[in-house]
Image: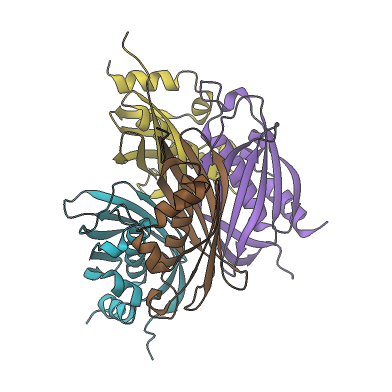
Chain colours: A cyan, B brown, C yellow, D purple
Amino acid sequence: MDLAKKLVDKMMNGDAFSQWLGIEVFEISNDFCKLQMTVREEMTNGFNIAHGGIAYSLADSCLAFAANSDGIQSVSIETSISHTKKVKSGDILTATSKEINKSNKTALYYITITNQDKLEVAHFKGTVYRTSKEWFPEK
Amino acid sequence: MDLAKKLVDKMMNGDAFSQWLGIEVFEISNDFCKLQMTVREEMTNGFNIAHGGIAYSLADSCLAFAANSDGIQSVSIETSISHTKKVKSGDILTATSKEINKSNKTALYYITITNQDKLEVAHFKGTVYRTSKEWFPEK
Amino acid sequence: MDLAKKLVDKMMNGDAFSQWLGIEVFEISNDFCKLQMTVREEMTNGFNIAHGGIAYSLADSCLAFAANSDGIQSVSIETSISHTKKVKSGDILTATSKEINKSNKTALYYITITNQDKLEVAHFKGTVYRTSKEWFPEK
Amino acid sequence: MDLAKKLVDKMMNGDAFSQWLGIEVFEISNDFCKLQMTVREEMTNGFNIAHGGIAYSLADSCLAFAANSDGIQSVSIETSISHTKKVKSGDILTATSKEINKSNKTALYYITITNQDKLEVAHFKGTVYRTSKEWFPEK
């Protein structure tokens, strides 16, 4: 089992909120992550539109998995999101990461969220600090 | 009953996700909003640390209420958040808005999230587009 | 002469600061812009490294040209930039825009800045408000 | 001469671009910086409005000075700016920093730019990485 998969198993295991969201890991490899979830009624804000926090949460999980996938513990420093299309109950959201830059101490990712019609609904940018601690140090 | 309160009642009523989060409205007035919620186990990510989406969601609700409180329908264009201290299960989070700029078409808010020890745990910036549609048009 | 070129001519003509920067328009078409400039000694900050404002200014011009290229007057609302590699005196910088979203009232662009070695040195995100005023109204 | 002043002298000395901008240091102390400059014709974009890069550059210098003022070398990771009022040739701009958070590895600053009428014209947010290298190591 490769490092990225082992790590995401560890991160998802017991991640109560990602489980509540119903996040499924579609693909995970070194510096790449693709997640999916379905929006439920209880995630909406009363106008049958998903709360902005839902797309953000999916993107933030995608950032965490992508950024940690090389085995170095990374923490979010600064994230931003533009919600460009309305998300509705029943929509299937897919978050796909793209590594834009990685240096010794920081890394930058763009994450795009699309719906079941391949329409882009949100654009997320995340910067992480790379701690240099390993997730699975060799003994 | 003043406009801001009437509006937030309307927005909160049926806002399933804000209710799931347990958000309570502490104060709402023209261009100002203060919200509170308590972090629960199911909002954490497996390390007993709240998922980044929780603080974002609280701040995003605070933005929505503050930006719409003058009765003009406003929608989020771009938001960013820096998570500066870890949030744990049991923490009581308070989000407080500050209007930084308001023009005819856009407005800018800073929102600070503090915990029960008055420590700042997250800093949020949100820009909204003001549609010029009224929430409660006079007949 | 097409609209985008006519517009950028109008915008560049008398744009004293873009001229001081030595910005040249490589390509301009509907919703796309590619600019180039060479970093000079007087743009550095004393460590022979370009001031962060130089890459920002190039990207901001690129945003303005791309966003206005369809003939609708657009103004910047919120921009962000990550400086990922050092820029030195003598470097040739190229800014390339990508339209990420365009709605009736707002539009979102990513702009990447590369140097003469094709290395990405900065990543810029810009949101504009589309005023609905035309640059060249038909009579 | 205290550390912050000594450092800004070092940073300003030979900072050709800040000198071109005409930046003057009004106040510098541990974690605080206040700068001023006057907008000139050659900084405008042809509509007698200052190019967005001018306010950004002033704010970015303010960030650099504030973030390095404790003697630890810090580098910008991610910055954002909202231009909220037009800046004209002849305007006197003042940038004032506020430290929002400082941890071992990163720090967050808000910088407000006002004009000669005390109107806020731009709002800047900057995150830096603190390298842990000292500017003036003791021998």
Q: Is residue C4 above or below residue D75?
A: above
Among all residues in the image, which is located at the extreme left?
A117
Quadrant of the rendering where the N terminus of chain A is positioned: bottom left
Q: Is residue A90 above or below residue C22?
A: below
Query: In the shown orientation, is residue A86 left or right of residue B105?
Result: left
Q: Residue at x 35, y 15 (%)?
A: C136
Among all residues in the image, which is located at the extreme right?
D1
The quarter holding residue D54 reads top right
Q: Residue at x 52, y 20 (%)?
A: D47
Residue B69 location in percent, x, y? 49, 46
Residue A129 at least partly seen: yes
Quadrant of the rendering where the C terminus of chain A is positioned: bottom left
Between residue B120 and residue D23, name the one nearer to us: B120
Residue B3 location in percent, x, y? 50, 45
Number of numbered markers: 0
The quarter holding residue A38 reads bottom left
Residue D80 at least partly seen: no
Query: In the shown orientation, is residue B18 left or right of residue B107?
Result: left
Residue C72 location in percent, x, y? 35, 25
Q: Residue at x 70, y 42 (%)?
A: D35
Residue A87 location in percent, x, y? 27, 53
Between residue D23 and residue B44, name the one nearer to us: B44
Between residue C101 and residue D48, name the one nearer to us: C101
Among all residues in the image, which is located at the extreme bottom?
A139
Between residue B9 and residue B49, name the one nearer to us: B9
Q: Residue at x 29, y 53 (%)?
A: A49
Q: Is residue D63 above or below residue D122?
A: below
